[in-house]
Amino acid sequence: MEINIKKLTVQDSAAVAELTTQLGYQTTGTTTAELISEILDSANHLALVAETGNQVVGWVHAFYAVRLESGRFVEIGGLVVDEKYRGKGIGKILIEAVKQWSRQRQITHLKVRCSTKRLASHQFYLKASFTETKEQKIFGLEL
């Protein structure tokens, strides 16, 4: 199976929305298209899709961040591979693309946050050479 990695486009919004539902998030192609447009407008964001044939089978979104307390880093904001294609190395290929993008920007630290409930994802990231550095709670406030 040949996997091609390409920059995400608004035309990918329906497929990306469908994959996003596999993560448990409810979204639509229209909402996803709006978010993709915003992401594509920023040089500090990377959004890629993995395709086999003409089918989108995975996506990754990463972004550059700087924090007073922890410096500069790139964070993977989201990564999903279609359930039917997991275990075939697609996630690893997407992570490698993020690592390459990060190195081009002289960033030496890559982070990813993962729900404590996603045990299979924990194993995936550990296998990809990430190390667990912190457990935390995320608090939100509707404005």
Image: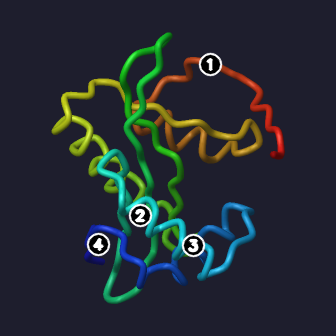
Nearer-N-terminus badge (4/2)? 4
User: Mark 2 sits on what residue?
Assistant: 88
Find the distance from the CA under tag 1 to the CA under tag 3: 30 Å
Mark 1: which secondary structure? loop
Q: Do the residues under discs 4 and 1 have CB atoms within 8 angstroms?
A: no
Nearer-N-terminus badge (4/1)? 4
Image quarter (top left, top right, bottom left or bottom right) of the N terminus: bottom left
Looking at the rendered structure, the kind of residue marked 4 is Ile
Nearer-N-terminus badge (1/2)? 2
Residue at position x 36%, y 63% in the image:
40
User: Mark 3 sits on what residue?
Assistant: 32
Q: Along the line of sight, which residue is nearer the eye, 121 or 31?
A: 31
Identify the disc placed on residue 134. Answer: 1
Of badges 1 and 2, nearer the viewer stands 1
Looking at the rendered structure, the kind of residue marked 2 is Lys
User: In terms of image quadrants, where is residue 71?
Assistant: top left
Of badges 1 and 3, nearer the viewer stands 3
Nearer-N-terminus badge (1/3)? 3
Q: Residues within 10 Å of mark 2 (few under 14, many from 20)?
A: few
Q: Along the line of sight, which residue is nearer the eye, 92 or 38?
A: 38
Of badges 4 and 1, nearer the viewer stands 1
Nearer-N-terminus badge (3/2)? 3
For this view, does 100 lie left or right of residue 139?
left
Residue ranking furthest to the top: 69
For this view, does 50 lie left or right of residue 141?
left
Looking at the rendered structure, the kind of residue marked 1 is Lys
